Each structure stands twice: as C-alpha cells, then as structure tokens.
Image: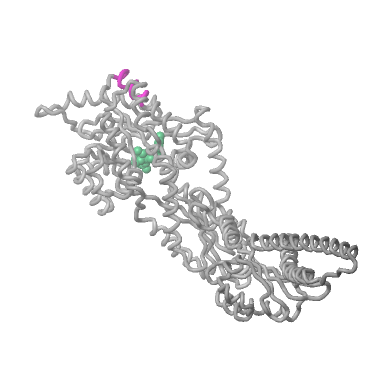
Amino acid sequence: MMLLMVGLFSYLGAKLIGLCISNLLLAKFRKIQVDARHIPDLPQAEVEQFCLTQQLHRETAERQRIQNELEKSLSWQQMTLESTTDGILAVDTQGNIAGFNQKFVQMWCIPELLLESGNYKQALRVALKQLKNPRQHLDTVRESYLKPDIQIYDAIAFKDGKVFERYSQPQRIGQKIIGRVWSFRDVTAHKIAEATIRHQALHDLLTDLPNRVLFNQRLSESLVQARQNSSKLAVCFLDLDRFQTINETLGHAIGDQLLQNVAQRLSKCLRAGDTIARWGGDEFTLLLPEISNIQDAIHFQEQILAAFKSEFYIENHYLHISPSIGIAIYPIHGEDAETLIKNADAALYRVKSQGRNNYQFYQSKINSQALKLLTLENSLYSALEREELIVYYQPQVKIATGEIIKMEALLRWQHPELGLIPPGKFIPLAEDNGLIIPIGEWVLRTACTQNKAWQDALDLPSLSVAVNLSARQFGQPNLVGLVKQVLSETKLNPQYLDLEITETIAMQDVDFTRKILNDLGNMGVSISLDDFGTGYSSLSYLKNFPVHALKIDKSFVCNLTSNSNDAAITTAIISLANALNLKVVVEGVETEEQRNLLRILKCEFMQGYFFSRPVLAEDATTLLKKSKSQRVSSYLENKTDGRWQMVDGRKNFSSFIVN
Ligand code: C2E
Ligand code: MG
Ligand code: MG
C-alpha cells in the first residue's frame, strides 16, 4: 500500500511540476513562431531564399508538431491530476501554493479563490479549523520546512469524524528541492469498516455484548491487577433456565429477542468496570473485578435474581425466565482464568441439578459431582434404547370411599451400575439436553397402555392415570397432536388421562398455556397443577386456566400437624379450590395424623406413602385388586342413609401400605 502510494505520489508530483515546465516551453515556442514571421526578404539570392524558405517551413512545421505534442501532453497531465481520487496540493519552498486539484478543494472545503491566490498560510488556517488535533498537523507542516527532504505518511482525523490518509514528499528538479507535494486520501469509510470488523471480532452479534475473546482478555487483565493489588475478583457463569423451551415453543426470533432483553437487564446490574459477555447460546459470563468480600458477590447475585423477577414482554407474550449462576472467586476458587471459568461452570452445573433459579459458589467437591452428572448424562442417551427406564405407579385415593381413583406414573431409571435412580436426578439433565421429549412420549404411551389394561382386566372402567409433563415437554411442538395419537393408539378414553404440570411451567407463557390447556381440555383430557403452593401461586390466573385439580405440594403436609402456618395455607388453598370448583389432591401424606387432619379440612383426595409408595405395575395391580375388594366389602358393611360410607377408613388405608 505504502509503496503504491509512494509510486502514485511521485508520479503525480512529477506530472504537476512537469505541467509547469510544459507551460514555460509552450510560451517559448509561441515566441519563436512570431519571430519567424518577421524574417526579412533577401532578393539577391533566390536559391538561398528558396532554401531558407524551405528550412523555415520545416522549422515551422516542426514547431507546430512540438506545440501540438505539448498541448496534448498538457491536457493528459491535467486530466490525470483531476482524475485521481486524492486531493493534491503542491507548495513551493517559499510557502506559496504552486498547484492543486479539484478533489483537494472538495475534500478540504477551502475556497478555490483562496487557493488560486497562492496564500498557503491562509489556506492552512482554514484547514486547521476542521481538524481534531490541529496542533499535530501544524507540527508536521513545520517539520516539513525544517527537514525539506522527509517523506510523511500518516492519518489525520477531522472533528466531524472524517479520516484522511496523508502522504507528502519533496519535489525536485535534478538534485534541487523546489517544493513539496501533499496528497490526501479520504479513508473514512475504510476506517469505519475496520472499526466495525474489530468490534465484531470482540462482540456478540445478537446482543452486542463482549464475546468470549474479549471476556478472556479482560479477565486476564483483571487478574494481573488483582495480583498486584492483592484484591479479589469474581467470575460468574449464568445460564437461563429452560430457555430451550421458549426457543422451541415460540421460535428462534422470540428467543433471540429474549436474549437481547436479558442482556439489557443484566447490563443494568453492572457497576462501572464490570464485564458481562455472551459466552454462547443462553450462557453469559460476568467478570466482577475489585470485589472486597464474598458479601459483595452475594449482593450482586441477589440483584441479578431480582432483575429476573418481573416478566419479559415480547411480541405479546409475557415470558417468565430465571437464571442459574455459578460463581468462582479469585484467589479462593482458582488463581488463573481457565480454572476460575471451569469452576464457575461447575458451580452452575450444581445449581442446575439442584432446582435452578439460584446461585452457588464453587465448592471443591463439585467437580467430582459434575463429572458424575456428566457420566450420567452420557449413559442417559442409551437408557431408553436399553429399556432401563421403568414407570412406577402411586395411587391417589378418594378418602370418602377409600377407592383408588387414579394412578400417578412416576419414572425411574434402573441404571446397570448405579441402581435405581429417582427422576429428580436425571429429568433435569434430560430436560437440558432434550432427551425428555422421547422419554416423555414413552412414559405417556406406557402409562396409557397400562391404564387401559387395568380398566379392562380388573373391570375398573373409571380408573385414571396421571402423567407428569416437564417444561420442555409442555412446550414441544404438537403436544396436543401427540396426546391425541397416543390415546387413539392405546384406545384409552381421554377423560381417564390427567396431565400434571407445575405452576412455574404454566406461568412461563400465560397465553400459550391457556391455548394448550384449552386444546387438551376440548379433547377431554384433564389437567392438574402439580406442586401447588411452591411456585407463583398466582390466583388471578387460576380462574383463566382450564385446570381441573390442584395438587397441594408435600412440603405443606410434612409440618401440617405441627406448623400452624402450613395448616392455614392448606386450609386456604382447599377453600380457594372449592370456590373455583377445582378438585384438591394433597400429596405427600405420610401419617395417619396427617390423613385425619386433612379429612377434617375437607380434603377429598390424597396421595402419599401412608397409602402406598410408588410401586411397579405388578404391585400396583395387587393394590388395585385389594382396593376394589375392600371397598366392596366395606360398602356392603356400612351402607347408611342411602350412601356408602366407610366406618374405619384407617383399617382400609393402612392395608394399602407397601414397603
Ligand atoms: P411429583 O409429580 O410431585 O411426584 C410426587 C413425588 O413425591 C414423587 O417423587 C413421589 O415418589 C413423591 N412422594 C409421593 N408420596 C410421598 C410421601 O408421602 N412423602 C414423600 N416424601 N414423597 C412422596 P418422585 O417419584 O421422586 O418424582 C419426583 C418428581 O419427578 C415428580 O414430582 C415429577 O415432577 C417428576 N417426575 C416423575 N416422573 C416423571 C415423568 O415421567 N415425567 C416428568 N416430566 N417428570 C416426572
Ligand atoms: Mg406429579
Ligand atoms: Mg408434586
């Protein structure tokens, strides 16, 4: 580039000076022509006269040819000078303007008359006013006078954002320097493009946050500072819980907007000097340099969790999303960038496996646990294929009659080495990696097939089955179609299928939930809100959702008899449900005392270890048979006032207990 510029400017400089010389020659030849017309007549020697005339003609013709050549050359040179995209200015050693082209006038916005007057000082004054750093330009001009043979190549910035590349070299005739040619090229667009490319290389295109590269750069710099100042810094890994569900349900365009909104909210939590970067997908990393203690980091995490409390409103969707955050502190949890990032990630993994929407600091034990989870996740891929998954069933009992009215399907994983793994250990993993979709479909099909078999074989036509749906399952495209297909394949009447979703899932996107629940309801399938009381418990939404039952979470039941608050909440939920015409099921009933108290609180349906633990299908068959025969016998014994009643429910219920 530089060489090209040097070549071009030498050429243009030579042309410009050549132009002046051409003008001089042309004037001289014109004079000779005029003189030739005045050669006196010499009559004494006709021959000589003739020869002279001939010579004169030849000379005149030659002069004419030279004049034409010069005019042509002059025209070419002028054209060349004007056709370059560079602005060119030639100044002689006395500081007078010797020439300039139109491009120079346009680029510098200096009045042409001023330039034609040759007053370089005046023109320079106009030029300086436009520059960001006029002193620097003036120094360069001065230097060019002090060292007339230097070449200058640099860039000058204008106040309005323009950038010119500047090249200057002395002009010589022979060895003598006769002036200097300045040449300017507008490289503003090029500089902007360069800056954009530099920005893009270090920033995420979607959110415009710093990317991994810039984050790592800043982390390395901050670590140097922290080492020097013996201060602490925090590295946080933040992941959005169940973001994939939103992406899959509402599409990537909404997912992208959500990420942009999240980026904005997170940015607002930062102090000056903090960095938030998009690590990839729905993962963000945060760098908090200069934290004075762990409490600072805790305070910051609380702020982040609070920032996610209110919903995001995107294209008519109210979206609830929560973050999980893993934190590693320098120098406690690692001394170099790589270790800190790895440990923050391990802490995040732990938050995820323990229920999400929270933060945790790294603990050295985590790594082995994360490794275990990773191994588990890998073998989960083949669990379905190798038929290691099993559906257990837990009865739901109608207290008034003691009959099992429903069986809840609860998944287990019979791992070849680790034994029976509860769903809480592997469903979050399956949810994250998407395996929950094929697994959930398999559970639905197995449970419906089993229920239909029980209905037919045990003559229990109104027995229902409940199947749990995770967030990703609920958001999967064509859930309604899948349910319809499974029901038709298994020939189970839709009214005997109950789908359980949690409040958190229901509240993720209220409009979407309402639509899906309506479609399922129209098909005849019933819906229960699982773990009720632990999530949003947004009562105002309850009446809008076509829900059939509330399942009060077991956490309220365990302290029911000792904690008056839990009893009060349970009572309130039961009366609320009654007012809204919803069925109430209390789960986690473990003791007789709890059962009795719940009966007083007018709870009609119960589920829990007191009646039976979740059991294999064969054991559930035994329970159903028992329930049926005992119910019939107790009915026969206790019919009063035209209603079947059980005198000693306790006897019947305890006889269900398995394990
Ligand atoms: P859930 O749907 O609320 O199921 C009730 C959980 O409480 C079950 O745990 C059950 O074994 C346990 N439980 C029942 N009675 C008692 C009791 O008296 N005391 C105590 N302490 N616990 C009791 P489990 O089977 O470990 O399931 C845990 C959660 O895993 C379920 O909670 C459900 O959300 C999820 N899950 C289970 N199976 C599936 C499935 O097939 N698909 C999906 N998406 N989630 C499932
Ligand atoms: Mg459930
Ligand atoms: Mg539950």
Quadrant of the image for the C terminus?
top left
Question: Within the displayed image, which quadrant is ligand 1 positioned in?
Answer: top left
Looking at the image, residue 383 lies above or below residue 318: above
Q: Residue furthest left?
A: 641
Front residue of this view, candidates 164 and 210? 164
- In x, y percent, where is residue 14? 75, 66
Q: Residue at x 47, y 67 (%)?
A: 271
Quadrant of the image for the N terminus?
bottom right
Q: Is residue 476 magenta?
A: no
Q: Main secondary structure of the magenta part?
A: helix
Front residue of this view, candidates 446 and 139? 139
Q: Is residue 629 visible?
A: no
Q: Residue at x 76, y 62 (%)?
A: 64
Q: Is residue 454 magenta?
A: yes
Left or right of 576 on screen, residue 52: right
Q: Is residue 543 visible?
A: yes
- In x, y percent, where is residue 407? 32, 30
**Which of the 4 image quarters holds residue 89?**
bottom right
Tell me the magenta residue range.
448-458
Left or right of 184 on screen, residue 53: right
Left or right of 74 on screen, residue 560: left
- In x, y percent, where is residue 592? 27, 40
**Which of the 4 image quarters holds residue 93?**
bottom right
Front residue of this view, candidates 633 and 260? 260
